[in-house]
Amino acid sequence: MIRIGDLYERLLAAYGPQHWWPAEKPFEIMAGALLVQRSTWTSTEASLAALKKRGLMTPQAMAAADLQAIEACIQGSGFFRSKAARLKRLAKFLTGSWSVRRMRATPTPMLRKTLLGLDGVGPETADAILLYAFGRPAVIVDEYLRRLTQRLTADPEPPTDAAIRRWVEAEIFDAPRLNELHALVVAHGKNVCGKTPQCSECEIRTLCLTGKGASDS
DNA sequence: CACCAGGGTGGTT
DNA sequence: AACCACCATGGT
């Protein structure tokens, strides 16, 4: 099994820096994290722009807005009704006892639990928010990373998310590289043929591997 | 026209 | 715990 440090370097060499979410405000990033679920970044960006144009890109404004006004802004994104409701609930949450400032001051494990308690925030979205909105060192285990690790290992049994997380954390534990890694994994995942979990030819070619991620155990 | 996109939730076995 | 339908629009 190739080491994650090596893989990171090869991905970076193959695709270059992706610069995801460089420096937007936390609330906008949180909104984006909800909107992009099972959708595309193109539609997400349009929805975010529409929300911003309507002046809804703050917890206070969005919490006070009509649900339909939010829906109208994000209609281009999939699942817009569910997402509008979730956005408004998030906004309300952030105007109550919690706030972006309080989140910023909350230790990562506690913050992660808090995020997971929100409607529409599962493990992946929680980690994405931790990493991209608050700069915390979080490993984002998404479907692309699962497929990738499964293709690189000889074990026919797919690795658990916990195992994948440990594998990454062993060598990559700082937010900037975790940020870049996730973006690179997505870029690579879109590039290779994602259909067949067994096919590793795309990795071998793109990442200059010699075979199956090769050797050791 | 079928399939998928930077998932999560609620219900059923 | 594993599986499933569902959410819904836009792009290829």
Image (cartoon, coloured by chain):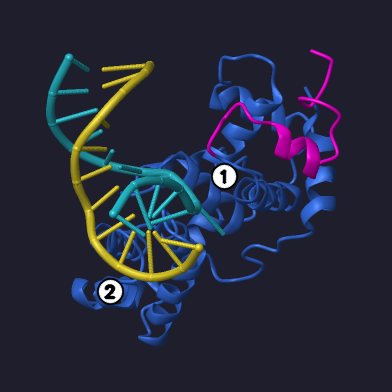
Chain colours: A blue, B cyan, C yellow
Identify residue type, mark 2.
Ile
Judge left or right: residue A36 versus residue C6.
right
What residue is disc 1 on?
A107
Q: State the predominant SS element of the stretch in magenta.
A: loop
Number of marks present in the image shown: 2
What residue is disc 2 on?
A70
- Residue C4 in which image quadrant: top left
What secondary structure is marked by label 2? helix
Location of the N terminus of chain A by quadrant is: top right
Judge left or right: residue A40 versus residue A159.
left
- Residue A210 in which image quadrant: top right
Label 1 Cα neighbours within 10 Å, binned few <14 / some 14-19 / many ≥20:
few
Membership of A205 in magenta stretch: yes
State the residue at coordinates (53%, 65%). A26
Identify residue type, mark 1.
Pro
Judge left or right: residue A209 versus residue B12.
right
What secondary structure is marked by label 1? loop
Circle nearer the viewer, 1 or 2:
2
State the residue at coordinates (67%, 48%). A188
Q: Is residue A147 above or below residue A20?
A: above
Judge left or right: residue A106 versus residue A155.
left
Residue B11 x, y percent position in the rendering: 13, 31
Identify the subunit bearing mark 1.
Answer: A
Magenta residues, start to end: A195-217
Residue A152 x, y percent position in the rendering: 70, 26
Task: Look at the image and tell me whether residue A168 can be seen.
Answer: yes
